[in-house]
Amino acid sequence: MDSAILNLTVIVKSGSNPSPVLVNKVTSALDTTTVTYATKPAFTPTSAQYAVLQSDLYQTIHIDITTIVNEWLSGATVNNGLALTNSDGTTVVQFATNNIIYEPYFPTLTLTYSESPVVNTGENFSYAQLSHIIEQLIALYPANTITVFTRGLTASSVTGTPYQLYKSSTGTYGAIFILMDGGQQEAIPLNAITAIYTGNDTVYNPSITYLTPPQKFAPGFDSNLITAYYEYLDVSTDVVMYMGSNINASGTVYKNEYGIIVLSDADGNTPIFIPVNNINVVLPALPSGGGSSLKSGIPKPFIEAKA
């Protein structure tokens, strides 16, 4: 998004001093038909603000909220709306709403973009999530020998130390994961990755963060799929997963976030990061005698690619 401008018409302005109006991001859901001052949701301040003057009365002011809107579009924060506050504690400012009769005073948001905005599809978010995780793996495990498993007609894996997540000059996030092996760069596109194994004797780092999903995904199968995986697999479930005919991973679901599942043991040892887009089959563990060859109590996380 090139720019996002909030347009508000001032209908009340008390006092002669400028009134500093601050734009805040609402951090929890609200119902605009029932919310009151006493039940107002929590919010956090942003850098977007405007000093309302007496000369602005019955005029439309313009506040740049481009950063806020781009965070909504990328999924970095959830769009729960905005809260406007006046920090001086003495003057009063009111803006027209769309409940008034005079339509030219209605609040509006003007969006400008040179290309079509990114749609909040499940697939877009999944790859943004994977990119976000890889950036952290590079920072947290820089000396580890990492194995990246890839999809294809035959099993394939690439091993090396994490070097770079390459992003194009016009890209919104990195799309090529580069490992280094003996001075040779090995470039793997994100859409080919079926699993990332951080190496023997590694432990899941609790500082790893995950992107917040958009408030609502665009309708479609890809959105249905990542939301279904998120709800279907509970944390602490023992599973075997197949990614292609010759790649399989087993372990306990240590983390289940939108677009990413992490297999490990109960203590986070030897984590395996699995993007949900390329999973073929999931076999949740059943109690002994439950009709599946997979029993509960998988001993330790494991992944392999059979030739």
Image: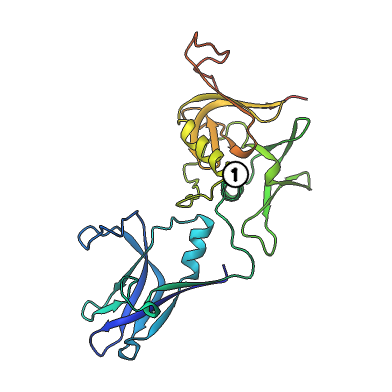
Query: At 39% from the left edge and 58% from the top edge, which residue is drawn?
Result: 80
Query: At 22% from the left edge and 76% from the top edge, which residue is drawn?
Result: 89
Q: Is residue 25 above or below residue 101?
A: above
In the rendered image, which quarter is residue 275 located in? top right
User: Looking at the rendering, in which quadrant would you find the N terminus?
Assistant: bottom right
The crowd level at tag 1 (other Cα within 10 Å; few <14, some 14-19, many 20+) is some
235 sits left or right of 271 in the view? left
Query: At 74% from the left edge and 24% from the top edge, which residue is drawn?
Result: 306
Q: Residue furthest front?
A: 101
In front here: 166 or 48? Answer: 48
In front here: 227 or 21? Answer: 227
In the rendered image, which quarter is residue 307 located in? top right
| Residue 182, image x, y percentages | 78, 44
Camera sees residue 254:
yes
- The amino acid marked with disc number 1 is Tyr
Camera sees residue 161:
no
SS at badge 1: loop
| Residue 251, image x, y percentages | 55, 26
- Residue holding disc 1: 141
